[in-house]
Amino acid sequence: MTQHLSPDEIRSLFAQAMSRMYRDEVPLYGTLMELVAEVNAATLASDAALAGRLQRSDALDRLDEERHGAIRVGTPRELATLRRMFAVMGMAPVGYYDLAVAGVPVHATAFRPVDAASLARNPFRVFTSLLRLELIEDAALRAEAARILDAREIFTPRALALIERFEQAGGLSADEAAEFVGEALETFRWHSEATVPHATYQALLAAHRLVADVVCFRGPHINHLTPRTLDIDAAQTAMQARGIDAKAVIEGPPRRRCPILLRQTSFKALQEPVLFPSGEGGDAGTHTARFGEIEQRGLALTPKGRALYDELLGRARAVGGAGSTGDDYGTRLASAFADFPDDDDTLRREGLGYYRYTLTDAGRADPARVTGSTLDEAIASGLVAADPVVYEDFLPVSAAGIFQSNLGGGEQRAYAAQANQAAFEAALGAQVHDQFEIYAVVERESLAALGTGD
Ligand code: OOG
Ligand code: NI
């Protein structure tokens, strides 16, 4: 019997290979990685409590490896095959994100590891959007886009063969895995030659800039890779100090003592040279799609906490109808979020966030006292530590902000279309996991392992 490499191992190899490729393609991403590593080292050195918490929740070792990427595909077949490709790397679709409400004609999911051990090993995630062709108004253009997409193949024959091999054999050997990583990478590579004449590109660009990005190239080039910082405000300042053209506003919640969910900022997409296959020797132009992003992750919220987050964010964005723009946005955001508790004890006891419980040294030394205490008593007397479960997913409003700031145009539009999770799952060929259930399991299992009296 051949030894199979674990999907976690394959994911790590793939994430490393992807990071190397993107650093070569977009050198500014390398700069961003250096900057984030410096900020993280400084933050850890000055915050022993944070370092201890990350250590307890297995998050310290993974920190330098941690990042997410994003791609956009055009057809159900492409999405369904990606699902099978990501399964080789232990990544499953989690969550449904409707971006049409925010004026971007896609819906999406995040492929990521699901169980705690795999997340601790390497939480690499890929935000994956599917174009909603039906939202292109012009019927002739819509048909042309569909024809172009149907004619392309974004996977190498060898990648497809190795996916089948994985499905049949239940795994890949180390050699097969290495080959798979190289072949899979081809799907995410940038191609500076468009597959359509400049005029077609322009027509699709006019329908929506994102449509041109999805339809006019050989594959769904990775459009950003995002390292995780422990202090996004410091990283944002460092970005500006290095003259990087950062987005004006950090998406997500304001700075808090107890970070919640996800805060993100990015540098603007680059204008890159593209050759269009028209006339003799092609026709030179540019395309704007690829950028860099950094993020800070915090507490995963329960449905109750998330509802409060959505309400407060809505309040901050509604004032003056300015969305996340406008000079006073930071002030509006901070004042709206004054109503969100900002200490772990309250967040935990009000059921706003998920926590992972572990015995402290004192707790391990005195099991009888643990058994004789309720959870709250055990925490109060230092027998049990409650650490925030880290949010591993994305936020639709933030994602829309990231999309908008990186499409290279100032356009704002809205689609009347409804969210359509059923259509997305039909295209995917599977149902997406419910993120809340995943966090709840982590919390429940940690509680069960504790042995407190309640
Ligand atoms: C995806 C944007 C969403 C995030 O971090 O919220 C995203 C895209 O631009 O394709 O990556
Ligand atoms: Ni992103």
Image (cartoon, rainbow, N blue to C red):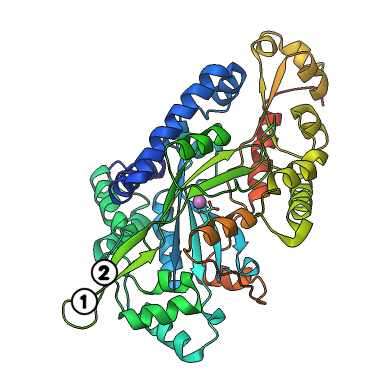
Q: Which residue lies at the image location 60% right of the left edge and 45% below the top edge?
A: 250
Tell me the number on the disc at residue 29: none
Total numbered badges shown on the rendered structure: 2
Looking at this view, name the residue that lies furthest to the bottom: 140
Q: In front: 100, or 317?
A: 317
Quarter holding residue 106: bottom right
Percent x, y for residue 436? 68, 48
Above or below — where is 108 with respect to 58? below
Question: Which amino acid is tagged 2?
Answer: Glu
Q: Residue at x 32, y 45 (%)?
A: 27
**Which mark, by number, is residue 282?**
1
- Which corner quadrant holds the C terminus? top right
Query: Can the viewer see residue 51 in this picture?
Result: yes
Crowd tier of the residue under label 2, counting other residues whose Cα lies within 10 Å: few below 14, some 14–19, many 20 or above: some
Give how far across and how far down residue 145 sits, in percent.
42, 82
Q: Earlier in the sequence, mark 2 or mark 1?
A: 2
- Give the residue type at disc 1: Gly
Indicate if the residue with disc 1 has its beta carbon within 8 Å of ligand 1. Answer: no
Query: Distance from label 2 to label 1 (Cα)?
Result: 9 Å
Q: Are marks 2 and 1 in contact (CB under 8 Å)?
A: yes
* Residue wearing tag 2: 193
Which residue is painted at 62% across and 71% down in the image?
422
Counting from the top left corner in percent of width and height, residue 65 is at 42, 36
Q: What is the secondary structure assignment of the residue under circle 2? A: loop
Q: Is residue 215 left or right of residue 196?
A: right
- For the point 30% across and 41% down, the residue is 3
- Could you tell whether 137 is left or right of 70 in the image? right
Of the pair 5 and 23, the residue shown nearer to us: 23
User: Percent x, y for residue 258?
Assistant: 69, 31
Kind of element beneath mark 1:
loop
- Res 75 visible: no
Q: Quadrant of the N terminus?
A: top left
